[in-house]
Amino acid sequence: MSATVLFVPGLRDHVEDHWQTHAARAFANSVTVEPLTEDRLSREARVAALDAALQAIKGDVVIAAHSAGCLMVAHWSAAPTRPIKAALLATPADVEHPLPPGYPSFEDLSANGWLPIPQHVLPFSTVVVASRNDPLCGFARAEELAQHWGAARVDAGAVGHLNPPAGFGPWPQGHHLIEQLLGENTGWGGGIGGSDAA
């Protein structure tokens, strides 16, 4: 059985033209963590929903997370309940600094358990994609998070926050990275280090 791709959105509702939506259609064996209807800003509830989705999947899993979804994966990995093959963490949100208008406030995120951002090495092969002009996370900060997490780093260039307002839509590079992670002979018990990826 081929690995399942589990898409982990951020704190948004379903967005039809988001790259994760397009990629979920492209990978036949994929699942998406559904948005919450209650406690939507609760980090604990979000991580529980992620765990429930993982527990329902049999066999290998490659996670493809975006924005605050990257933080959900990092929080979950502090006490993982099952093995993960690999994870793609695209443009993580830096909730330790105030986000732009229209996003949850620093105070609300703090009150709902999002701070601090985990800084342990993730126990599975991980790639962090950093944007040169992400309004939710500076490039140097994304690289710092990747280093903490023991992740390979991919410089995606000036792609904003990799969402429809930034022009995405389909994200071919992300599709390629997921395919690479699906093909890796990786598994439980160790990140792939802090090497740069092209």
Image (spheres, rainbow, N blue to C red):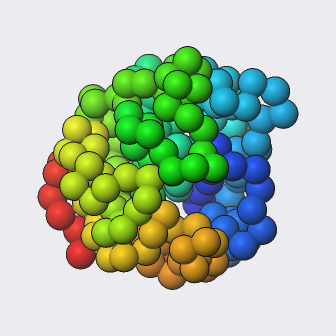
* Figure quadrant of the C terminus: bottom left
Q: Residue furthest right?
A: 37
All told, the count of numbered labels is 0
Where residue 80 appears, x then y in whole percent?
A: 46, 25
Residue displayed at 75% across by 24% down? 39
Pick whichever, 144 or 187, lies toward us: 144
Question: Residue placed at 22% from the left, 38% from the top?
Answer: 148
Q: Is residue 189 visible?
A: no
Note whether 12 is above or below 77 in the view shown. below
In the displayed structure, does residue 159 sit left or right of residue 29? left
Q: Is residue 4 left or right of residue 155?
A: right
Instruction: Examine the rendered structure and indicate whether residue 174 appears above or below residue 136.
Output: below
- In this rendering, position of residue 196 left or right of residue 141: left
Where is residue 186? Give x, y as percent.
34, 51
Judge by depth and name the residue closer to the eye, 62 or 103. 103
Q: Is residue 98 visible?
A: yes
Please report the residue visible at 63 percent of the width from the left and 77 percent of the height from the top: 169
Residue at image position (58%, 67%) is 163
Q: Position of residue 125 (x, y in %)?
A: 33, 49
The answer to which image quadrant residue 24 occupies is bottom right
Q: Is residue 51 left or right of residue 178?
A: right
Q: Quadrant of the N terminus?
A: bottom right
Residue 89 position within the rendered picture, expressed as x and y whole percent measured from the top left? 43, 53
| Residue at the limit of the structure toward the front, as seen here | 101
